[in-house]
Amino acid sequence: MITIYAGPSAIDGAPIRAVLTGADGRSSRNSKTGPMAQLWILPADRPVWDVIRAGHDRSVCGDCPRRPSVAGYGREACYVARRGWREVASVQRWSSSDPDLDRAAAALAGRLVRLGAYGDPGALPPGIVPQLVEGAKGWTGYTRRWQTRPDLRPYCHASVEHELAAWHAWREGWRTFRVLQPSDASLPTLERACPAASGRTTCDRCRACRGSAGRSVTIREH
């Protein structure tokens, strides 16, 4: 576990901490992603579950409509808040080291990383993500901050909810990750259904969600 950043959120200035886990080669517990290192972007001043329950997690999640304070705790809420908050809290509890971005980047050399097991990479200041993945074999990532953070375009997909937002993002040169509602369908020539969601592969093998070099992806509510 390596802290890569501790300081103000690029979203609202609140104190946050970004932590890398799994760079030692230990497998992720997430069967969908496969054995990727994981980047967690967390509140730094209060227990994460208190922050989630109070609806004060904008510093790490931005204006995501799936935050529990907006979407509640049903099917439309963030799956991490619904199912994985204990792991998030555990990472936060043990992430007490001083930031060492150079060490984290060295640990990722030749490895794969998921940029955002919790939190939005757009909460980090510009320059952090490029340095972190400079020697990495590959990555996946998503951001809701695509309208204000073009520097993340090579590394993250624009996370969007609707086809109109996807068209806006495509015009700006982004690849997109879109959650489909029951009445929605993928656009065959522009998007592909997430193959990891159906168990046909894993994120570490697919890597479609790797920013501007990837492909736009859709997924059903899960």
Image: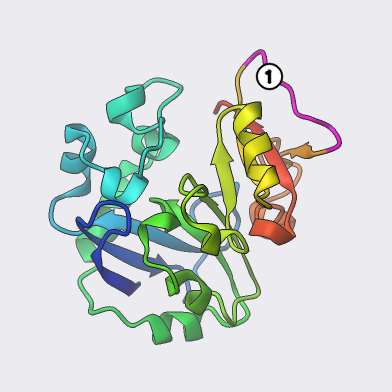
In the displayed structure, does residue 107 sit left or right of residue 57?
right
Residue 200, x across and y down, in percent:
76, 42
Task: Please indicate, yes or no, whether residue 85 appears anywhere in the rendered image.
Answer: yes
Q: Is residue 10 positioned above or below 128 on the image?
A: above
Instruction: State the image quarter where residue 140 is shown.
Output: bottom right
Residue drawn where x is 68% and y is 35% of the image: 167
Please state which amino acid type lies under the numbered disc 1.
Answer: Asp
Magenta span main SS: loop
In the displayed structure, does residue 29 sit left or right of residue 194?
left
Residue 67, x across and y down, in percent:
35, 33
Residue drawn where x is 16% and y is 40% of the image: 50
Give the quadrant of the N terminus: bottom left
Residue 87, x across and y down, in percent:
33, 50
Disc 1 designates what residue?
184
Query: Farthest residue in the top direction?
Result: 183
Task: Please indicate, yes or no, whether residue 210 appears anywhere in the rendered image.
Answer: no
Q: Is residue 2 positioned above or below 51 on the image?
A: below
188 drawn magenta: yes
Residue drawn where x is 68% and y is 51% of the image: 202
**Magenta-highlighted residues:** 182-189
